[in-house]
Image (cartoon, coloured by chain):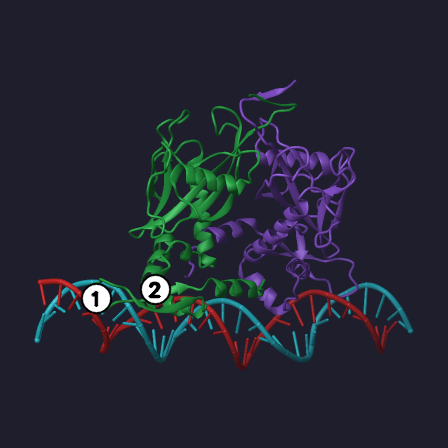
Chain colours: A green, B purple, C cyan, D red
Amino acid sequence: MEYRYPYPHPALTVDCAVFGLDEGRLKVLLVERGEEPYKGAWALPGGFVRLDESLEAAALRELEEETGVRELYLEQLGAFGEPGRDPRERVVTVAYFAIVNLFDHPARGGSDASAAAWFEADAPPRLAFDHADILAAALDRLRGKLRREPLAFEFLPRAFTLTQLQRFYETVLGAPLDKRNFRKKVLSYGILEELDEFEAGAAHRAARLHRFDRDAWERLRASEGSYSV
Amino acid sequence: MEYRYPYPHPALTVDCAVFGLDEGRLKVLLVERGEEPYKGAWALPGGFVRLDESLEAAALRELEEETGVRELYLEQLGAFGEPGRDPRERVVTVAYFAIVNLFDHPARGGSDASAAAWFEADAPPRLAFDHADILAAALDRLRGKLRREPLAFEFLPRAFTLTQLQRFYETVLGAPLDKRNFRKKVLSYGILEELDEFEAGAAHRAARLHRFDRDAWERLRASEGSYSV
DNA sequence: AATGAAGGTGTAATATATACACTAACAAAA
DNA sequence: TTTTGTTAGTGTATATATTACACCTTCATT
């Protein structure tokens, strides 16, 4: 089968920068390429968009095919389309960034042949194509979002301690935060629900677990309307 | 000539949501479609990406061809690619949003056959394709950016009064601002240069003109690094 | 029983944001 | 030339938000 068009079409792919938090380190999910070009190199999971699926559906499909990761928060990062970014033909990719909760989705390889693994987001191996640029853009976006939204919940287990939450912010923002001020602020939003459960197995006082109240968050976002200059 | 590929390729276009400020109203630049589909309807300026040009270059080229507008601030908004958004074939578009200074670039039609005109950004005519969605996304983005960056300068003449600047913010944000607080804040950034020139021809006290100091802005942006939670 | 390790809590100082009203300057009209 | 209309330009007091900072509690382990 061959497809013909009266004028040239670039190829269209999607790629996903999937982040997760593991042992207090920010990780990114990469796959090893099994095909030329860049065979053997690591790359962001992704692939060609089918004609009958939306861009986001393509991203979710490729991600699950290549890494087994599914049901995640996906946001479009943007299109990357410099001529020459793929040595075969003109390929434009729409990049997504995604966050997985490593507690719910333990890091594991994909279900198909290619290998998948987590790497330090700040120190990835040499990446195929322009994926290093895409990853850098995704990291910027992640840090930017995190300053404005309680995105952390997407990374954390359903119930978490305030210290876990603080560590997460510290890891992604790359800066230490004051414990008391952090708690004061995060609790003031009213989007955390105190549980009557406590951390287990620690050799110190057990910390109370909290849960993210998504409805309260939605209400908070909807009510934000006042900005100065 | 015919182009053949071993698997199907969607078509790729770029579209631009170009905003300008005119008489205190936020305007968007639209073109009248001369071809089917949606012949006669208004649409965002844009068109097909050539294989040898970058996405941004395609956006700039189409914009100049269709509207005569050139040399502007362009930022990628994202890709829009729902199947069915174009009745002909699968077309994915990369949308850009752009700002023109109507003082420097007077609103005028394009150099080619199609008509171009400015419309109220908040009340555009019925738009072709999914351009209403793209426009709505661009407006959101514009307002969001404006809260964080002195983007206003892209809209204003090279020299402007503080009242013009304030009107601009009020127009885009859709809310009145306090004059004294506005001045205090905008001057505190140190990115405005007082000129020894004054507004002319007004039937009231002449206002001092200011200029945007782009270097100071760059320094300011570079130095911003502290964020809380 | 002692130790180690994290959990949990409040206040004072500073910085930022907001609310608010009058005089000055100029052109146009009377 | 006086009056009128219109916008320019300015400061302070209050409220809110942010920051810096240290100790006792709780629990498991030794």
Q: Residue at x 62, y 45 (%)?
A: B97
* Mark 2 secondary-structure assignment: helix
Q: Residue at x 59, y 36 (%)?
A: B56
Give the total number of marks visible in the rendering.
2
Q: Please give left or right for residue A61 compared with residue B27 in the image.
A: left
Tell me the quarter of the image containing the C terminus of chain A.
bottom right
Disc 1 or 2, which lies upstream in sequence?
2
Q: Is residue A53 above or below residue C22?
A: above
Residue B66 is tagged as none
Name the quadrant containing residue B25: bottom right
C-alpha gap between disc 1 and disc 2:
15 Å
Residue type pointed to by label 1: His
Q: Which chain does the residue under circle 1 lie in? A: A
Residue type pointed to by label 2: Leu
| Circle 1/circle 2 CB separation < 8 Å | no
Q: Please give left or right for residue A219 compared with residue D1 in the image.
A: left
Q: Position of residue B184 (x, y in %)?
A: 57, 66
Residue A162 is tagged as 2
Name the quadrant containing residue C12: bottom left
Q: Which chain does the residue under circle 2 lie in? A: A
The residue that disc 1 covers is A204
Q: Is residue D14 above or below residue B127?
A: below
Along the line of sight, the residue nearer the viewer: B1 or B102: B1
* Mark 1 secondary-structure assignment: loop
Along the line of sight, the residue nearer the viewer: B160 or A147: A147
Q: Position of residue A150 (x, y in %)?
A: 44, 59
Q: Please give left or right for residue B199 compared with residue A81 in the image.
A: right
